[in-house]
Amino acid sequence: MTMFRATYCPDCGTKLVSQWFEGKDRPYCEECDRIIFQRPIPCADVAVLDGTEVLLIKRTNPPHVGTWALPGGVIEAGEPPAEAAARELHEEAGVHVTPVDLTLIAGYTAAAPQGWYNSGYTYAVQFDSVDGEPAAGGDASAARFWSLDELRDSAEQLRPEHDEDHIQDAIEELRTE
Ligand SMILES: [Zn+2]
């Protein structure tokens, strides 16, 4: 399976044909006798909350280059989502969290520009439960806390899936604990 709709078989290189399966035309390899499914990319991200402020990073990689977003990224094969979230938080924002300290607050699916789409888990944690001070790394060029007012006033600078409503949900979720 691939994130793009495949044209050639990723295993044997044969040009794929179309086969109807479960309500859709799917790319099919006649050599391997199998459908090459297009799948969403599983992602995980973290809202680190300091009161009603949230830690965001500025993205330097597609999609949404230059927007501010929750630290996060693609879950590796075999990696539990919370571990992926913790790893990406450290890579992009420089702070450590123990995966078990993360609270799962939402799932989402989002279209991405090249015709693929991702599907994510959003976690939240209070800043006093993480170690270190924010410092950008990986595919982030900046990392800092944003207030909710600033988020509302700067909606166009935010990654669409990580807009102020999504972050507000994270804040509300941790408040009720
Ligand atoms: Zn094949």
Image (cartoon, rainbow, N blue to C red):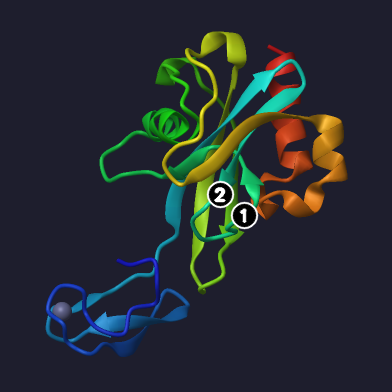
Sequence-wise, the earlier of marks 1 and 2 is 2
Nearer-the-camera pick, 22 or 145: 145
Point out the residue furthest to the top here: 128
Which labelled disc corresponds to residue 66? 1
Q: Secondary structure at mark 1?
A: loop
Quadrant in the picture for the N terminus:
bottom left
In the figure, 87 relative to 73: above or below? above
Using the image as rendered, state which of residue 171 and residue 173 is in the foreground.
171
Residue 10 image point, x, y percent: 21, 74
Q: Residues within 10 Å of mark 2 (few under 14, many from 20)?
A: many
Callout 1–callout 2 Cβ contact below 8 Å? yes
Task: Say which residue label 2 marks.
Answer: 59
What residue lies at 31% left-to-right and 44% top-to-bottom?
Answer: 76
- Which labelled disc corresponds to residue 106? none
Q: Is mark 2 within 8 Å of ligand 1?
A: no
Residue at x 87% of width, y 33% of height: 149
Residue 53 drawn above or below residue 45: above
Marks 1 and 2 sit apart, C-alpha to C-alpha, by 5 Å
Instruction: Give the amino acid type for the residue marked by disc 2 in the picture.
Output: Arg
Q: Is residue 117 left or right of residue 17?
A: right
Q: Position of residue 62 (x, y in %)?
A: 51, 60
Q: Quadrant of the C terminus?
A: top right
Inspect the image, locate mark 1, and give the three-letter code of the amino acid beneath it: Gly
Q: Secondary structure at mark 2?
A: strand
Please provide percent x and percent y for residue 121. 52, 39
Q: In the rendered view, does 6 fall on the left or right side of 128?
A: left
Query: Crowdedness of circle 1 by 10 Å Cα count: few (<14), some, many (20+)?
Result: some
Query: Residue at position x 43%, y 49% from top?
Result: 42
Q: Quadrant of residue 29?
A: bottom left
Ligand 1 is located in which of the four quadrants? bottom left
Left or right for 143, reference 93: right
